[in-house]
């Protein structure tokens, strides 16, 4: 089966970059990314390619090359579904905020809406691909909806979870560690559908890196991969506090531990805590699934990863207050970095939101600088928490366009995103413009400590 026409529902952080790379690597395939969010589609189609809604290094160049050649962005979901041989579902699957499983389970309403829309529109056989991260066994529910509400056409459901990391999405998509494809390996049609998707990726990914499994293994692998990654961060963060009490240095401990080839060096960086849209929601989902199967010990084990992460954010903020003589009321605190990590404009679950919220509850005045995050986004993140009114947030928080401006007359600075540019700042000049003692809290272990202490900063870094 040769695929000529691909549709992707969901033009977000996964759908956009993933389809841009497929379009670039498979020039003979027409790729249409659709979304119900008109503003987002308009931004993807902005003639100025630097204004696309997602910032990822290298992405705008690919969009420039492929857009209107074989990559299209549209709000006409029905048309794209109708024309496609292969449909990726890449919509959001946030944690439920209501009803059964509230605060834990993944909310599958967007996925189900997609399935119903596909069923209503499709007039010929389709391969439907779960690109979103989904609870194990969702494919069965999708198949049920498609088979029972459709026009009698045949569907093959594949699971093809995405392992890209924001900030390095393009590089990860071009050179993935592996591509995972789960499908109905028992049937001829299932194997054909899997082969069709394998062939798309094989245009640029070496065959030995393309894994095929049964659907349930594929679905569960994505949740497990995120749980393992987040678990490493919480593990080293747990040790960071012990380092602070004992005089050990968490960077030295991480290096010594990571040089064991069984452990490996990556993802062992102590910090103010992990953020991003995925780790927390996927672990909560894993915990919820384990609970629904009555696997209490399994659920409790993974839940601890989240408990540790929440604690780390709180601990960082509490330490700021304590260090500044137990009060930050009326004090100006500069927050450098709002994105959940460098090289992305995504702020979902960013540690900065929670640290700022904690400090605002202590009546601090906050000034934020981030090179890629908009003022509108920062206020919307704080408003979403509901800790205080929108007006109160706008009164206590100022967003500025330069780090110098953020730090001027500040009592303290908190570095909360590891943007490279923060390393190059003129720290002496910043120090001179601050109130004294000038506190500098490094939540990312980004800055070299000795030079900052020599300048005169009261310097605090996680795990030191
Ligand atoms: P996102 O929120 O950036 O994008 C999802 C898009 O889907 C939104 O623009 C929304 O308007 C659209 N949408 C929702 N329902 C729709 C419908 N019925 N019809 C058309 N469009 C609809 O989400 P993101 O970050 O791209 O994540 C998507 C999925 O991929 C999630 O399941 C996530 O867990 C998973 N994932 C995310 C990664 C990440 O780094 N962001 C990495 C790997 C997986």
Image: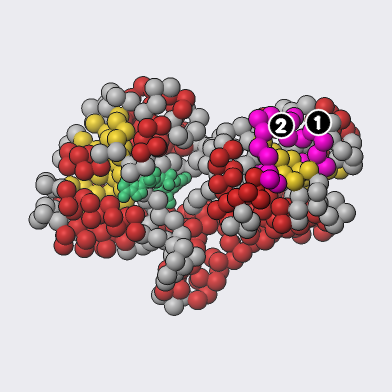
Q: With 125 as the anchor, is 431 left or right in this view?
A: right
- Residue extending furthest toward the left: 152
Q: Is residue 294 visible?
A: yes
Q: Is residue 298 above or below residue 278?
A: below
Sequence order check: which comes first, mark 2 or mark 1? 2
Q: Which residue is mark 1?
A: 430
Task: Assign a secondary structure to mark 2.
Answer: helix
The residue segment tinted magenta is 395-418
At which x and y percent is residue 336?
A: 69, 38
Q: Which residue is mark 2?
A: 403
Q: With 324 as the anchor, is 344 left or right in this view?
A: left
Q: Is residue 362 above or below residue 399?
A: below
Residue at x 71%, y 57% (from the top left corner)? 361
Residue at x 53%, y 57% (from the top left corner)? 280
Task: Name the foreground residue: 361 vs 369.
Answer: 361
Q: With 164 as the anchor, is 137 left or right in this view?
A: left
Q: Is mark 2 within 8 Å of ligand 1?
A: no
Residue at x 54%, y 37% (from the top left corner)? 344
Crowding near the residue tagged with mark 2, few <14, some 14–19, many ≥20 C-alpha atoms within 10 Å: many
Residue 38 sits in which quadrant? top left
At which x and y percent is residue 125?
A: 13, 48
Q: Kindly check if marks 2 and 1 are in contact, taking CB atoms under 8 A apart as contact.
A: yes
Task: Name the foreground residue: 49 vs 286.
Answer: 49
At which x and y percent is residue 233?
A: 61, 53
Residue at x 58%, y 61% (from the top left corner)? 306
User: Would residue 403 be counted in the magenta stretch?
Assistant: yes
């Amino acid at each position: 089966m040769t695929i000529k026409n691909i549709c992707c529902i969901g033009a977000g952080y996964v759908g956009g970059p993933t389809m841009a790379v497929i379009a670039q690597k498979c020039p003979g395939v027409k790729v249409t990314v659709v979304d119900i969010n008109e503003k987002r589609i308009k931004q993807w189609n902005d003639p100025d390619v630097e204004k696309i809604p997602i910032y990822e290094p290298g992405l705008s160049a690919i969009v420039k090359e492929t857009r209107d050649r074989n990559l299209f962005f549209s709000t006409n979901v029905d048309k794209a579904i109708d024309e496609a041989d292969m449909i990726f579902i890449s919509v959001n699957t946030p944690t439920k905020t209501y009803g059964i499983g509230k605060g834990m389970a993944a909310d599958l309403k967007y996925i189900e809406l997609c399935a119903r829309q596909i069923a209503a529109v499709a007039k010929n056989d389709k391969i439907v691909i779960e690109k979103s991260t989904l609870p194990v066994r969702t494919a069965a529910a999708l198949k049920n909806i498609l088979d029972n509400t459709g026009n009698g056409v045949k569907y093959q459901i594949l699971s093809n979870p995405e392992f890209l990391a924001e900030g390095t999405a393009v590089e990860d998509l071009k050179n993935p560690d592996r591509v995972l494809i789960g499908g109905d390996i028992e049937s001829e049609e299932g194997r054909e559908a899997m082969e069709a998707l394998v062939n798309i990726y094989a245009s640029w990914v070496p065959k030995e890196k393309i894994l095929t499994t049964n659907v349930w293994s594929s679905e569960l692998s994505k949740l497990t991969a995120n749980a393992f990654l987040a678990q490493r961060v919480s593990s080293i963060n747990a040790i960071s506090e012990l380092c602070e009490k004992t005089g050990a240095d968490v960077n030295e401990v991480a290096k010594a531990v990571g040089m064991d080839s069984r452990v490996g060096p990556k993802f062992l960086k102590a910090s103010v805590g992990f953020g991003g849209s995925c780790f927390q929601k996927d672990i909560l989902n894993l915990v919820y699934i384990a609970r629904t199967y009555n696997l209490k010990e399994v659920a409790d084990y993974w839940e601890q990863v989240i408990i540790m992460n929440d604690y780390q954010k709180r601990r960082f903020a509490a330490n700021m207050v304590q260090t500044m003589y137990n009060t930050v009321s009326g004090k100006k605190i500069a927050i450098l970095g709002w994105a959940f990590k460098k090289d992305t404009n995504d702020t979902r679950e960013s540690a900065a939101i929670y640290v700022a919220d904690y400090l605002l509850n202590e009546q601090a005045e906050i000034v934020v600088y981030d090179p890629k995050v908009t003022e509108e986004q920062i206020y919307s993140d704080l408003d979403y928490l509901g800790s205080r009114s929108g007006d109160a947030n706008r009164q206590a928080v100022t967003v500025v366009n330069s780090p110098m401006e953020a730090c001027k007359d500040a009592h303290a600075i908190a570095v909360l995103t590891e943007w490279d540019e923060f390393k190059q700042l003129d720290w002496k000049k910043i120090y001179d413009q601050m109130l004294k003692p000038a506190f500098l809290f490094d939540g990312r272990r980004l800055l070299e400590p000795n030079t900052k202490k020599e300048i005169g900063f009261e310097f605090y870094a996680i795990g030191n």
